[in-house]
Amino acid sequence: MGLIVQKYGGTSVAGAERIKSVAKRIARSRGESNRVVAVVSAMGDKTDDLIALAHQIASEPDDREMDLLLSTGEIESCALVTMALHAIGEPAIALTGAQAGIKTERAHRRAQIRSIDPYRINRELDRGRIVVIAGFQGITDDMDVTTMGRGASDLTAVALAAAMKADLCELYKDVDGIMTADPNLVSNARLLEEIDYEEMLELAQQGARVLAPRAVELAAVFHVPLVVRSSFNENPGTLIHEGVKMELRNKVRGIAHDSDVAKVTIQGVEDRPGISAALFEPLADAGISVDVIVQNASSQNVTDLSFTVGKGDLARTVRLVESLAERIGAARVSASEGWAKVSIVGTGMQHSPGYAARMFRALADKQINIEMITTSEIRITCIIDSARTADAVRALHETFRLDKAEL
Amino acid sequence: MGLIVQKYGGTSVAGAERIKSVAKRIARSRGESNRVVAVVSAMGDKTDDLIALAHQIASEPDDREMDLLLSTGEIESCALVTMALHAIGEPAIALTGAQAGIKTERAHRRAQIRSIDPYRINRELDRGRIVVIAGFQGITDDMDVTTMGRGASDLTAVALAAAMKADLCELYKDVDGIMTADPNLVSNARLLEEIDYEEMLELAQQGARVLAPRAVELAAVFHVPLVVRSSFNENPGTLIHEGVKMELRNKVRGIAHDSDVAKVTIQGVEDRPGISAALFEPLADAGISVDVIVQNASSQNVTDLSFTVGKGDLARTVRLVESLAERIGAARVSASEGWAKVSIVGTGMQHSPGYAARMFRALADKQINIEMITTSEIRITCIIDSARTADAVRALHETFRLDKAEL
């Protein structure tokens, strides 16, 4: 194999012993592959510790300085992993995001990668070195350090793999790969050998926290084959790639859930063009991520509109929506926490009748009420009482026989 | 006052509360001065902790990666100090050594500053901001991070003050300033209000650890007035500057001591040109810093040569010298630890008889044997048994009446 990009998460590099074992794994890959680039996250709880320290000093730390502060976590671990490689005789070099040529927009704490200039990385690879890169960070044209949001080391790895046309991008985590459901809820959840980009994207967006949706999206756009696997064992993990089996398959691949859901309903909204934009644009401007949106058919030109947000954003959302509701002449705003999303994901469901009915029946049999429903081409999502999350996930896992190996 | 460069040492920024009080001090200086640049060290024991972590992973960590690792300590504190300034309403920006335009040679762990391009610093000062800079670090032309050796944050501050033609460079430490002797040994040691560059340089080189000799040297070359003062009180500290009172004064200003001394003696060295070079060049190449060198007058064309090194370098030094001694036909090499240097420092001593005699008498009265003697224009140093260091420093402090305020 030519070029491989690997990424090691925070748990994988938490402490000297784990760093040494990561180094051994990288060295082994180098034996099998010519060129290896390894992206690393900050050690264990390092990022949280730095955030806590900043909040001891300032109640609202500036984003630019926060980025500079947080970037040190990944620089630390990339220097240490490189030292561990040297200690076992492997030529290697540590590069910060800036040194690796990762250029981003100036949007601190949530920067998007604009371009990657892999000149230095290629030069070091050509010299026979393993290149270890600090994940999660980049640099603006003005040489200011940026970070790309939680979990963005995955994104760094995928972006590098895309820019360098790597043959494979391996994401090493503290789990075995992508499961049919959360194994904490479903004891017979099964590891998926492979899954296509779209299915993975839906699972990630609907609450499977193993992989950030941004990383999956980028991999899909640039056709980067991804493997999610554990850094603590030799299991092959899950391959995420183009859906080669798509036309042969027509079934549920996995169950995703998210218990961090709050719901806002605006009643008595006049049903005319521009109302939704007037509502959601200010939320977007405030950086509030709206998830499910459901609008019922109107009667007498008046409709109800519901949407969900993360619990942490609820208070801000309600403040904004109440002032907007007045302006657009809505009757009433109500909001509540304690909701969960459960989703079934699988390519081809839309074209095959019966999936939705089976899902609703499974929930009904467990006396679980469905508050809202939303669907995509390859997904059906129900909003339910969060206290029933585990019951719902288990029921759906059983109904769709996800414990059984696929043909 | 126009531009002031301040530097806050590791003890001054150890912890959230101290960082907040450093921010208040910087803000106050900004009120008195138009433009303030603050250089910061890593928090407390951060650098030592990082070194210990590296040694858990590799017995001999690579210097390049060690520099990258250590540089995170100062980046962390400069981000935090800047956040603390924001929290009290001061416009401020944190810059790494690289962002501040501090270019060094490629000599990891002990890089020398090649140039400073203060473009970004000036731009931020022009925008009314306080500029907080990570000390101790720079960057090569190849964008590799370098550090400049222990205590080099002082050097960063002085170099910035020189490059930007600052009106004053204030070094904030955990001591009140430069004392006539180590107050841990001499209870009535007195704070010096001012001292000239040369005297300070001798004190620093002879063991006064408050200030690194490199920083004093640079300040002297570029005529940067330095103030060493405490970050924990309002005392004015010690002003280090051109020796304005030089011709009026003719006395001992301070006592320096260093108990970290090992001695090597090469006996029966043939007294011919080139022998010393043949001995000391290989030591310099090995990065061993030789301190005092004494060569006795020869008898019958054969001489003895003694020199001192830090205890930590003794083993390597002896290995090198033994192989060299054979080659140059020396009779015997002996080495021992347990020595100390005590020095009296003061401009004009050389031209005024009696200082050396008074020093030797003071030591003799305490039954302290003198092993070696070496002098400079403004200093007399004796090598003595390190067990007698405190006695020697106290005796000299009393003999030269350093507890009494100067006229």
Image (spheres, coloured by chain):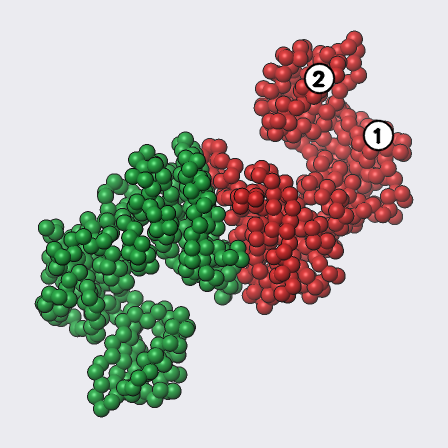
Chain colours: A red, B green
Share a chain, discs 2 and 1?
yes
Chain identifier of the residue bearing label 2 in the image: A
Left or right: A188, with B25 as reference point: right
Q: Type of residue at label 1?
A: Ala
Q: What residue type is disc 2 on?
A: Ile
Q: Residue at x 46, y 60 (%)?
A: B105
Left or right relative to B353: residue A7 = right
Distance (Cα) linking label 2 and label 1: 30 Å
| Mark 2: secondary structure | helix
Report the side of B129 relative to B174 (left or right). Answer: right
Q: Residue furthest top?
A: A300
Q: Which residue is found at the position 47% from the left and 57% from the top?
A: B146
The label on residue B228 is none
Left or right: B6 in relation to A221: left
Q: Quadrant of residue B110?
A: bottom left
Quarter-of-image position of residue A30: bottom right
Image quadrant containing the N terminus of chain A: bottom right
- Label 1 marks a residue whose chain is A
Query: Residue B398: x percent and y percent?
Result: 12, 59
Which is more toward the observer, A13 or B111?
Answer: B111
Residue annotated with mark 2: A275
Q: Which sits in the foreground, B182 or B55?
A: B182
Residue A18 shows in this picture: no
Q: Is residue B60 above or below residue B129?
A: below
Image mark for residue A356: 1
Residue B394 x/y as whole percent: 16, 60
